[in-house]
Image (cartoon, coloured by chain):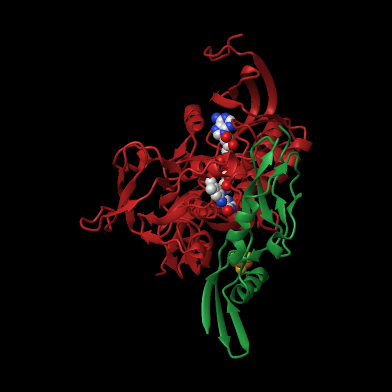
Amino acid sequence: MWGKQNAYWVTNMMETDVTVIGGGPAGLAAALKASENAQVILLERGRELGGILPQCIHQGFGNFVFKKMLTGPEFSQYFIDKVRQSDIVVKTETTVLEIDKNKRIIATNSAEGILEIQTKAIVLSMGCRERTRSQILVPGTRPAGVYTAGTSQRLINIDGIMPGKKFVILGSGDVGLIMARRFILEGGEVEGVYEIMPQPGGLTRNIVQCLDDYNIPLFLSHTVTDIVGRKRVEGVTVAKVDESMKPLVGTERFIPCDCLVLAVGLIPENELSKQIGLDMDGRTDGPVVDERMETSVSGIFACGNVVHVHDLVDDVAVVAEIAGEHAAKYVRENLERRGKIRTVAGENVGYVVPQFLRGKELDSVTLYFRVLSEKRGATVIISCGEKTIFERKEKIVKPPEMVKVILSREVLNALVQNELRVDVRGGK
Amino acid sequence: MSESMTCICCPLGCRIHIEKKGEKTQITGHRCKKGEEYALQEIRDPRRILTTTVPIDNGMLCLLPVKSNKEIPKNLVKACVIELSKISVNAPIKCGDLVCKNILGTEVDIIASRDMEER
Ligand SMILES: Cc1cc2nc3c(=O)[nH]c(=O)nc-3n(C[C@H](O)[C@H](O)[C@H](O)COP(=O)(O)OP(=O)(O)OC[C@H]3O[C@@H](n4cnc5c(N)ncnc54)[C@H](O)[C@@H]3O)c2cc1C
Ligand code: SF4
């Protein structure tokens, strides 16, 4: 039978309350929470559940959710076991191709062909993907031996393939730092990590534990200006950059290596969100959401890295539960949408999530935001019109580390204007 | 003597300062007890959790991620990884199953960090 969009020959039709798209930690936690009060289908493109976590074999997950440190596989195992014990319908190796505003989902897998799922609510949790060479415009030839950090992680930790012997890492994002240590432990050599910004992109603990522990040098304000090699990478040229990030003539240095690893950041994977026509935030590259993680289309929720890039999976699990809970609630009784309040990124703030608040059901609301530049002794100030409603002195704030502020219901109920401004003032 | 370090016990990564004045050791900057214990340990006997993979026969995947059930001396991490590259295990495996007992005499065990079904 032809699907309603008339573009696909639908071989299987299903109906449900809540459909969750993406089976990473966000999707798993959202599906579990939603399944307490609704019928749930979980769709995952990959062969197994867990999202990026099965390849993150290092320790560093779950300190806040489980009060102990777990590896990525352990963290996801907990959620996978729970999902298996629940009555959630799980479909792996199933890719969602299309979603429309009426919440009709078109997905495909090799066993069933084309599925059409009519659902009452949707949770988007497609995670993010890595920036690639073309997005950062590294010149030079295109030999083999250039990998993103996540790809090299998958090759080593899942497939057992060592992608090179001598590595240069461009970018100091967390995945790159984690991989620097991994290359060394697997018998490789890491010449250095080169970061174009004057400060590191990854979490401090990864700098300490992955680079310092192994004496791997980190070169700040440096970039790769050329990749040399015909069939295989033979080396790269690195150079210092000035304040406007332009390479400085005369500082070039050639480094022989057979592998260049790009750890230049992640971008939310939002083709589906854009195709539905959700309002997007140009600063997060994710859909705009309210405090219940509902997007601009009612009944469509989003959580995890698809909304903005999180550094901690614990935060992902927390917001995913909020999304799942409210998706189930929407199915039963719709959600209240009154008194829309916008959150505004002010001084030294890159973005604020949620972008707006409009419900009354949560006892407290957590605002997540990132600063633009590192400051010691700055003050976080949240204000509504002339009135300051929250103030906190911070020992240190840095772009790689998300800042959180919890606002109580009493404080929110007392707001008189429809704009909440977040500033991080002062500091050195 | 004074020393600064970054706590690696959790993603918060508190900056901890240790000040030694004669007999007294003063620790500041940590946000929880774990951080204080870590700082003391780090100056006396630095240890790390080891995570790596071992080959697995008959499994859904060809590698099994493993970790040490306790921290091992920092200077033995590399030697333990080399030791583990010599072992292989058989599916099925459950998360937490023993993979290598008392690795290199450290009294630390290496355990599986996920389930691995048979192929
Ligand atoms: C290398 C690395 C190291 C990290 N280290 C830490 C750490 O030490 N501590 C910590 O707390 N956090 C860490 N993180 C962060 C943490 O892993 C992420 O915050 C978390 O995985 C985000 O979860 P997610 O579910 O949003 O996305 P993901 O885990 O990316 O999952 C998204 C899922 O959606 C699926 N999907 C996408 N599109 C479709 C589609 N169209 N149809 C069906 N399925 C689809 C994907 O296949 C994927 O499985 C790390 C991340 C990386 C990459
Ligand atoms: S001191 Fe406590 S809160 Fe701070 S990083 Fe260490 S474990 Fe985390």
In this view, A239 is above or below A142: below
In percent of the image, x 70 and y 62: which residue is there? B70
- Colour of chain B in the image: green
* Quadrant of ligand 2 in image: bottom right
Q: Position of residue A153 (x, y in %)?
A: 53, 45
- Front residue of this view, candidates A355 and A247: A247
Q: Position of residue A114 (x, y in %)?
A: 60, 17
The quarter of the displayed image where residue B115 is located: top right
Q: Position of residue A123 (x, y in %)?
A: 61, 35
Tell me the quarter of the image containing the C terminus of chain A.
Answer: bottom left
Is A158 positioned to the left or the right of A16 in the image? left
Q: Residue furthest bottom?
A: B22
Observer able to see residue A60:
no
In percent of the image, x 41 and y 62: which residue is there? A217
Q: Residue furthest front?
A: B86
Q: Position of residue B81 (x, y in %)?
A: 61, 55
Observer able to see residue A206:
yes
How many circles with numbers are drawn on the protein? 0
- Front residue of this view, candidates B31 and A336: B31
In percent of the image, x 42 and y 59: which residue is there? A200
Tell me the quarter of the image containing the N terminus of chain A.
Answer: top right
Q: Residue furthest top?
A: A1
Q: Which chain is red?
A: A
